[in-house]
Image (cartoon, rainbow, N blue to C red):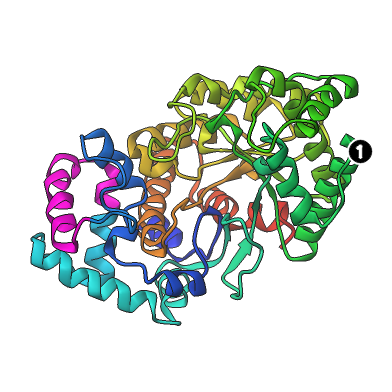
C-alpha cells in the first residue's frame, strides 16, 4: 500500500449525514438481520420482491423470510448495495454461510450486537475511524457523544390538512390560530432543536414534490393556510392549492436557519425507491430547481446532498459558481463507485477544496456505515493517487485535500 492510501485510511472522519437510530432505540427494537437491509431493500424490490415481506410487521416466519431474502439476494448480489452488506457481514460478524440456517444464526448474532451497549463505539469509533456522525431520526435525544442530530423540517411545510397544522402546534406547545402563530410555532421548534444540539436543518421535499420553489406573497400563503384551518381534520387540499403555502414556509425555514447559523442540507438527485413518496419522479430532484433560493440567499449555507446524481454535471457547475453551495458526497459511493470516482475527479478540477464534504454514510445501521466508509476511503485514495500521477496535485496537496473533505471542512462548516 502506498503512502497516500495509508494516509487516507488513518483520517478520523466527521460523518456528515446518517439515519442511524440511537443505540437505545436499536436495542429497544431488537434489530436483527432483516433490519440491516436498508438500501439493499430497494434493489430487492426492483428485482421483484414483494414490499414489506421482510419487515417486522410481516406475518411471514423467520425461516420463510430467510428463504425469500436468499431468493432475491441471488438476483441482486451484483449491486454495490449488496456488496456493502456482504462486506459488513463478513468483516463484523465473520459471516460466510449463505443458507437459510446461516441467515437464522446470523440473525441471532445481529440481535446480540443490538443489545450490546458498546457496539456503536466499537463499529463507528474503533473500526470505522469516525469521531462523530450527524444523524436524522426525528429526535434530538442522542444520549451518546458519537451522534449529533439533524432534524427534518419537511413536517413543518408539508401541509395538506388541519391535522398537519395541529401536529406542529402540539410539538411546539404554541396555540395556532393564524399563519403568524404558525410561523412562531415553527421558529420555537427550531430554537429548541438548536438548544438540544441540532447542527443543521434538512429539507427532503424532492421525495414528494419538486425542488423548484416560487416566491408567493404572504397573502397567497395565508389563503391556503386559512382554508386548512376551517377544513376537517382529514380533508386535504390539493398539492396545487398547497404549493404557495409550502413555498412560503420553505423561504421562512431558510431565513430562520440563517439566523441560527445552521447549514441547510437539501436532498438532490437520486430517490430511494423503498421510501419515495412521489413514484420516483426523478426530475423533481433536479438540482437546478434550487436556483431561485441559491440566488436569493447568498448568506445561507446550502449543503446539497448526493452530488445531484444523475444530474451531476449541473451540480458541479452550481458548486463551482455559488459561494453559498457546499458539495456533499453522502450516499454517492454506494450508488455507483464508478460515478463517484468520476464526480470526485471532476470536482477536484472544478470546485475549491474547502467547499467539499467527502463522506456521509446515509445508513440506518452502523454496519452499513462501516462498509461505506471503507469504500469511500478507497475511492478517494484512488482518485487522489491518479491526480498525483498525472501531476495535477503533489502528494502533500493530495493529503491536505483528503483531510479537508473527510474532516476539516465539516469541523468548520458545522462549527464543531
| Residue 10 point in image, percent of width and height | 45, 66
Q: Which of 167 and 218 is in front in this view?
A: 167
Q: Residues within 10 Å of mark 1 (few under 14, many from 20)?
A: few
Q: Overall secondary structure of the magenta stretch?
A: helix
Q: In this view, does 128 lie to the left or right of 135?
A: left
| Residue 17 point in image, percent of width and height | 55, 52
Q: Nearer the viewer, residue 376 or 364?
A: 364
Q: Nearer the viewer, residue 363 or 238?
A: 238
Residue 320 visible (yes or no): yes
Which residue is most to the bottom? 117
Q: Quadrant of residue 1?
A: bottom left
Give the residues drawn in magenta, as a range.
60-84
Say if 275 sits above or below 298 in the image.
below
| Residue 152 point in image, percent of width and height | 64, 47
Say if 48 sits above or below 384 in the image.
above
Q: Mark 1 points at which residue?
A: 180
Amino acid at each position: 500500500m502506498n503512502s497516500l492510501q495509508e494516509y487516507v485510511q488513518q483520517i478520523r472522519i466527521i460523518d456528515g449525514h446518517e439515519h442511524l437510530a440511537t443505540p437505545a432505540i436499536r436495542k429497544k427494537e431488537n434489530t436483527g438481520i432483516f433490519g440491516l437491509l436498508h438500501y439493499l431493500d430497494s434493489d430487492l424490490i426492483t428485482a421483484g420482491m414483494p414490499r414489506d415481506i421482510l419487515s417486522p410487521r410481516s406475518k411471514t416466519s423467520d425461516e420463510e423470510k430467510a428463504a425469500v431474502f436468499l431468493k432475491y439476494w441471488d438476483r441482486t448480489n451484483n449491486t454495490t448495495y449488496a456488496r456493502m452488506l456482504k462486506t459488513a457481514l463478513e468483516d463484523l460478524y465473520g459471516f460466510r454461510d449463505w443458507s437459510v440456517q446461516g441467515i437464522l444464526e446470523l440473525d441471532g448474532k445481529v440481535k446480540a450486537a443490538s443489545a450490546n451497549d458498546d457496539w456503536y463505539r466499537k463499529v463507528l469509533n474503533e473500526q470505522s475511524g469516525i469521531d462523530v456522525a450527524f444523524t436524522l431520526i426525528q429526535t434530538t435525544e442522542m444520549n451518546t457523544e458519537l451522534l449529533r442530530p439533524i432534524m427534518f423540517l419537511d413536517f413543518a411545510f408539508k401541509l395538506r390538512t388541519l391535522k398537519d397544522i395541529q401536529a406542529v402546534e402540539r410539538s411546539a406547545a404554541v396555540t395556532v390560530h393564524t399563519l403568524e402563530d404558525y410561523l412562531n410555532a415553527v421558529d420555537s421548534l427550531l430554537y429548541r432543536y438548536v438548544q438540544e444540539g441540532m447542527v443543521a436543518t434538512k429539507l427532503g421535499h424532492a421525495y414528494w414534490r419538486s425542488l423548484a420553489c416560487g416566491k408567493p406573497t404572504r397573502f397567497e400563503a395565508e389563503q391556503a393556510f386559512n382554508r386548512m384551518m376551517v377544513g376537517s381534520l382529514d380533508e386535504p387540499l390539493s398539492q396545487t392549492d398547497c404549493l404557495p403555502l409550502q413555498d412560503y414556509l420553505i423561504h421562512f425555514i431558510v431565513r430562520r436557519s440563517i439566523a441560527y447559523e445552521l447549514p441547510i442540507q437539501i436532498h438532490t438527485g437520486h430517490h430511494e425507491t423503498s421510501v419515495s413518496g412521489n413514484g420516483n419522479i426523478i426530475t423533481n430532484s433536479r438540482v437546478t430547481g434550487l436556483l431561485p433560493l441559491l440566488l436569493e440567499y447568498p448568506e445561507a449555507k446550502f449543503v446539497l446532498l448526493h452530488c445531484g446524481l444523475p444530474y451531476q454535471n449541473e451540480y458541479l457547475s452550481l458548486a463551482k459558481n455559488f459561494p453559498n453551495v457546499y458539495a456533499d458526497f453522502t450516499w454517492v459511493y454506494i450508488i455507483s463507485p464508478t460515478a463517484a470516482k468520476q464526480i470526485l475527479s471532476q470536482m477536484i478540477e472544478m470546485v475549491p477544496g474547502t467547499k467539499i464534504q467527502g463522506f456521509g454514510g446515509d445508513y440506518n445501521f452502523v454496519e452499513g456505515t462501516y462498509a461505506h466508509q471503507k469504500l469511500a476511503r478507497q475511492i478517494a485514495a484512488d482518485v487522489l493517487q491518479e491526480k498525483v500521477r498525472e501531476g495535477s496535485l503533489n502528494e502533500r496537496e493530495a493529503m491536505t485535500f483528503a483531510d479537508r473533505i473527510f474532516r476539516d471542512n465539516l469541523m468548520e462548516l458545522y462549527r464543531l
